[in-house]
Image (cartoon, grey):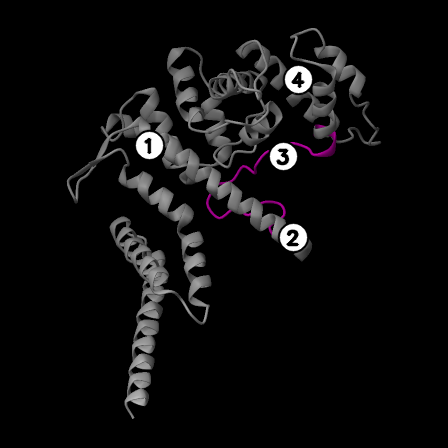
Amino acid sequence: NKHFSKGFLNDTPRDTATFLRMYNKHFSKVEIGDFLGSGDGEYWDAVRLYFCSVISFRGMDILQALRHFLTSPLFRCPGEAQKIDRLISTFSRCFWNDNHGTKACPYSGVDTIYILCFAVIMLNTDLHKASVGKTKKKVKKMTRDEFTKNLRGVDPSFDLKMLESIYASIQKEQIQMPTGGPSEGEVGADGGGDDEGSEAAFKASVNRAVCNVQELLRSVSLYRHTFLRLGIDTLVSVDMAAAMFRTVWWMVHATINSLLEKPRIKTEMAIQCLGIVQNAISTAIFIGAQQERMAFAAQLLRLINRAKGARAARGDAGEASGD
């Protein structure tokens, strides 16, 4: 409301959803989840749809997509049934829009997807709920037959093999919601994990980073902005460019570092690295990313020193051949 009243933000579903995605690190995941789950009507439905539609579910089966949605680093799904209902309804529409007509979506419609998703959430809660009471009495959990029986006949696509596969997957691996704190600087429950899982954790973090960039790129079509400092008309806002750069810069930096560690680099490769570093420094200066600018500046210095060393080596070789 403060941003609306001061004219910093238009009171439209698209602007509201984009604001939440761009500045999510300034809010807790719980706050964003509660906000998205609040309200009925066209305005709130549009906010949820604009917020969630940039998350790509293409090529994922329903369980993969639901896991991806519920474990999103942007928000935590609220605990109130009515709010869950609204968010799952939006997810169902997004999944249908991304996969309708493909093997990943054999379902007859959005309502069918919604029913299956709600059943999966209930199963996840039921199978992994803790014992209750002072005596820690064990609670009876839903069996595979009970789960399949509840859904068989709802839709022709709900075949026994698919339902049993969903049950087995949820039983083996719980859908873990993200923690409720701000997005920035969170490592998660396994932040200090052992060395055995470090490689898998690294690959997972890279996959999440790539996925986040894909989602950011998908959302740039929502707006047309102008880089005021350069006067260039573009689909990418300064904030969007900054978010994408901060998501991928360390991967680019690490790749160039690995090349610089090699004793010999081809001239073409060195020129490409130089161009990438120059562009990275320019972008870092433009968005005010001082740490990233210093990191790439150090790489530029290494490239210059290597070039000087190579030139000196050629000079020495020439003198030796002349002698």
Q: Which residue is mark 4?
A: 119
Return the residue found at the far front: 322
Residue visible at 39% across and 35% down in the picture: 216
The 10 Å Cα crowd at callout 1, few under 14, some 14 to 19, many 20 or more, is some
Q: Which residue is mark 1?
A: 220
Dot 2 or dot 1, earlier in sequence:
2
Answer with the quarter of the image where residue 305 lies: bottom left
**In the depicted view, which residue is nearer to us: 29 or 58?**
58
Q: Percent x, y for residue 149?
A: 76, 11
Q: Which residue is mark 2?
A: 193
The kind of secondary structure element at disc 4 is: helix
Residue 37 as seen in the image, left or right of residue 81: left
Q: Distance of mark 2 from mark 1, alpha carbons?
A: 36 Å
Residue visible at 45% across and 58% down in the picture: 254
Q: Any magenta on residue 36?
A: no
Residue visible at 31% across and 79% down in the picture: 314
Q: Percent x, y for residue 72?
A: 52, 33
**Secondary structure mostly seen in the magenta stretch:** loop
Q: Distance of mark 4 from mark 3, alpha carbons?
A: 16 Å
The 10 Å Cα crowd at callout 3, few under 14, some 14 to 19, many 20 or more, is few
Q: What residue range appears in magenta?
A: 170-193
Q: Amino acid at mark 3?
A: Gln
The kind of secondary structure element at disc 1 is: helix
Q: Distance of mark 2 from mark 3, alpha carbons?
A: 17 Å
Residue 185 visible in image: yes
Q: Any magenta on residue 184?
A: yes
